[in-house]
Image (spheres, rainbow, N blue to C red):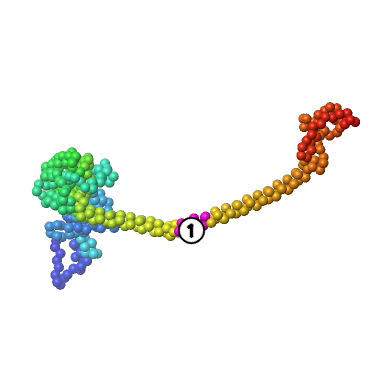
Amino acid sequence: MPLQTSADSPVPVRTALRLVGDWVGRLGRIWVEGQIAELTKRGNTAFLTLRDPVAAVSVRVICARTVLEAADPAPGEGARVVVWAKPEFNVARGSFSLAALEIRAVGIGELLARLERLRRALAAEGLFAAERKRRLPFLPGCIGLICGRDSAAQRDVQQNAARRWPAVRFRVEQVAVQGAFAVAEVTDALSRLDADPAVDVIIIARGGGSIEDLLPFSDETLIRAVAACRTPVVSAIGHEQDTPLLDLVADVRASTPTDAARRVVPDVAEQLDLIAQLRARAYRIVAGRLDRERAWLDAMRSRPVLADPVSDVDRRQEQVTALTERGRRALAADLDRAADDMGHLRARLLALAPSATLKRGYAIVQRPGGGVVRSATSVGPGERLTVRFAEDQLSVTADESTKA
């Protein structure tokens, strides 16, 4: 029954809030759909603000953290969800909230959950590993471009690439970039460009769009085809906030088609400036090296031995002359001493020589063989003898009177 009140018989606030709480409690558990506007985690509890995108109203949702993380993947801010919850009214605070018992992703949230599961499966196979990504060529001779028919993405890539390097060449494959035929056409174009040996790098470009429009670029068939390419692939899908799975498997991820042109083609002006800087740096290095070598050479030339080499030769010549004169004096002194010794020795020899004795009137009697006769008894009669004097000699014959 409705509560009977009047200005004369009002009810206290606590009574009104208690009655509201009773009415809310009779709702039971209900399913509520909305979009997560805010999400806060404190300990084991999660606090969500569930907003109705049509009526622009919101309600506070409280749940255990395990309930939020039980969804695969766990929803974040902006996700559309349905919540199995029990309405609650806090009498003390006068606030209404939902105590969530289960949270499920719906609509886009369910689509994102499916993409997340595919992403995890492909990542587990190593298709997104950084070590398998290849470096882009410095200056590609021909760029393969996969884009929509007469699309702005094609014009952005070609115009920006030509502005950076006018000689750049393209092989363009125009395909459907959304819809049922997009995956097959993009995959076929990728296969043709990868088989062309003239193509050095492949760009897959498309302008921004909704998640549904970009679904072909998260298709498993296309992702595996890109992973199997021998030619480096650049992903330029959508805008900065768009992240299809193609961005993860591509060798390089560009935020926009314009960014793809900047990453693939070097800027000729920048390269010329770089060459000028390197030439200036090389000139400074060579000039510095020459200055150091010139200073070293000047220092060497300033040394006395190189500044006036003749003076050192003269000094050495004086030393040689002095040593020569010293040697000559030493040799003369030695010769003089040797001459004196020879004179003394000669005088001694003369004093002791038999010839000197003979000159004093003595004679030497010798046999024909040269033997000296020392006594008369040793000479036989008739023996021929030689009597040697100081100046000459005389041959004699011994007789008996001599022996007697």
Residue placed furthest toward the right:
404
Q: Residue furthest left?
A: 150
**Can you say whether 229 is above or below 277 in the image?**
above
The residue lying toward the viewer, choosing from 347 and 154, is: 347
Q: Is residue 316 magenta?
A: yes
Picture residue at 36% right of the left edge, 58% below the top: 291
Reply above or below: 142 against 369: below
Classify 10 Å Cα crowding around label 1: few (below 14), some (14-19), many (20 and above). Answer: few
Can residue 182 be seen in the rendering of this structure?
A: no
Q: Nearer the viewer, residue 384 or 260?
A: 384
> For residue 384, what is the image quadrant?
top right
Indicate left or right for 21 with 42 as reference.
Answer: left
The magenta stretch is: 308-317
Q: Position of residue 280 (x, y in %)?
A: 28, 57
Q: Is residue 313 magenta?
A: yes
| Most distant residue in the bottom direction | 8
Q: Main secondary structure of the magenta part?
A: helix
Q: Quadrant of the N terminus?
A: bottom left
The residue labelled by disc 1 is 311
